[in-house]
Image (spheres, rainbow, N blue to C red):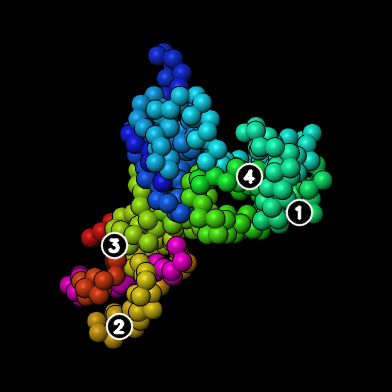
């Protein structure tokens, strides 16, 4: 549905030059919610703004819903953009217009007549649960309500794609939750494809099907969450299931076991104790619902001889569990 194909983008002059996107390729499937995470300055905003050509790439291709936007002239690009909605961290509402007026604006600029505008705005305000605020002004609304209006405005032209630029970053956790629920609902009910950027892993956990990690303008890792969580050494998986540092004074072998799908309810600790006589200590555990199924990670300390530990780990792996040994003093796992 969205194809970002070998896109590069730089800013500045030859003397002072930033390569914000460095040969980025990404595919977002129809109906998918795709999250791009990364630290400040990694290139997230630049990436999402290239999708509707708010930033034109220096090289590479952008294709949305079968149309290669990078090859379109100004008029065709204007039409194609009607199929791409966008929401922003600071909502970008017009303070001089009512809620209804803000939503209608998206239709005014594409030449929809007054009667149809009113009816469509009414319909979409109902969808976002704010029909009763149609005549209010943005200053009279809470942050969450403002973002609902931003979402309503972005949906007015019935887009097939929604771009979300840190849409919940200015909201408190409870309001964030309700906006994410709304995004999930419109994704499901309208079949909308959503590409979002965020610096919050919780957003990815809550609603994304797939994710990419961007660093220094390059995609460091990407994939479906259900696949990433059982990929050895996945940094995104470690961000999704943070287990922290290995406590000082740990002397046994430390392993992280990732459980996903049908493996989530294995009695692993009991098995290690019974079959290998290992006196297991639990150092940490986290369980999450990721992309609709339960997954988790447990960190264990296994005292005992290297031979016994190796045999136990091999046994766990034979059962299909992802087992990573953890080097003390770091949080990173290494597939041993
Ligand atoms: N218009 C611009 N002119 C010059 N440099 C820019 C411009 N826009 C972005 N950059 C630079 O490109 C790099 C990527 O910026 P970008 O805003 O895409 O990152 P980001 O991951 O969205 O960061 P943040 O989370 O802080 O918004 C940064 O080094 C930034 O300074």
Residues at circles 1 and 3 in contact by the CB criterion of under 8 Å:
no
Badge 4: residue crowd in 10 Å (few <14, some 14–19, many ≥20): many
- Any mark on residue 271, and which? 2
Q: Disc 2 to disc 1, how far (Cα)?
A: 57 Å
Secondary structure under the numbered disc 1 in the rendered image? helix
Secondary structure under the numbered disc 2 in the rendered image? helix
Q: Disc 2 to disc 3, how far (Cα)?
A: 18 Å
* Mark closer to the chain start, 3 or 4: 4
Badge 3: residue crowd in 10 Å (few <14, some 14–19, many ≥20): some
The reply to whether residue 168 is visible in this rendering is yes
- Looking at this view, is 64 or 239 the one in front? 64
Mark 3 — residue?
A: 325
Q: Disc 3 to disc 4, how far (Cα)?
A: 51 Å
Residue located at (56% from left, 42% from top): 85
- In the image, farthest residue toward the bottom: 274
* Mark closer to the chain start, 2 or 1: 1
Q: Is residue 191 left or right of residue 282?
A: right
Secondary structure under the numbered disc 3 in the rendered image? strand
Q: Position of residue 238 (x, y in %)?
A: 40, 56
* Mark closer to the chain start, 4 or 1: 1
Mark 2 vs mark 1: in front: 1
Report the magenta residues as a range: 291-312
Q: Disc 2 to disc 4, how far (Cα)?
A: 56 Å
Mark 4 — residue?
A: 156
Mark 1 — residue?
A: 131
Residues at circles 3 and 4 in contact by the CB criterion of under 8 Å:
no
- In the image, farthest residue toward the left: 307
Whether the residue carrying mark 2 lies under 8 Å from ligand 1 is answered with: no
Q: Quadrant of residue 319?
A: bottom left
Residue located at (31% from left, 55% from top): 233
Q: Position of residue 287 (x, y in %)?
A: 46, 68
Residues at circles 4 and 1 in contact by the CB criterion of under 8 Å:
no
């Amino acid at each position: 549905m969205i194809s970002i194909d070998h896109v590069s983008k730089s800013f500045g002059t030859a003397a002072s030059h930033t390569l914000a996107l460095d040969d980025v390729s990404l595919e977002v499937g129809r109906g998918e919610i795709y999250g791009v995470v990364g630290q400040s300055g990694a290139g997230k905003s630049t990436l999402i703004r290239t999708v509707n050509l708010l930033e034109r790439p220096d090289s590479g291709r952008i294709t949305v819903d079968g149309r290669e936007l990078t090859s379109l002239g100004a008029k065709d690009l204007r039409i194609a953009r009607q199929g791409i909605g966008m929401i922003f961290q600071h909502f970008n509402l017009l303070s001089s217009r009512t809620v209804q007026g803000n939503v209608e604006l998206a239709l005014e600029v594409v030449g929809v007549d007054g009667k149809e505008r009113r009816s469509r705005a009414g319909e979409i305000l109902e969808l976002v649960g704010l029909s009763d605020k149609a005549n209010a002004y943005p200053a009279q609304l809470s942050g969450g309500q403002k973002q609902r209006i931003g979402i309503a405005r972005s949906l007015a032209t019935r887009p097939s794609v929604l771009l979300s630029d840190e849409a919940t970053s200015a909201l408190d956790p409870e309001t964030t939750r309700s906006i994410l629920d709304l995004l999930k609902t419109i994704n499901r009910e309208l079949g909308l494809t959503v590409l979002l950027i965020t610096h919050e892993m919780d957003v990815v956990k809550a609603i994304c099907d797939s994710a990419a990690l961007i660093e220094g303008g390059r995609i460091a890792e990407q994939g479906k969450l259900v696949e990433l969580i059982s990929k050895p050494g996945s940094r995104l998986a470690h961000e999704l299931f943070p287990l922290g540092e290995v406590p000082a004074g740990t002397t046994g072998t430390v392993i992280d076991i990732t459980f996903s799908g049908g493996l989530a309810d294995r009695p692993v600790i009991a098995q290690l104790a019974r079959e290998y006589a290992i006196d297991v200590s639990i150092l940490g555990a986290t369980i999450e619902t990721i992309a609709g199924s339960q997954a988790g990670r447990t960190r264990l300390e296994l005292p005992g001889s290297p031979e016994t530990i190796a045999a136990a780990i091999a046994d766990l792996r034979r059962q299909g569990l992802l087992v990573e040994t953890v080097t003390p003093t770091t949080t990173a796992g290494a597939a041993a």
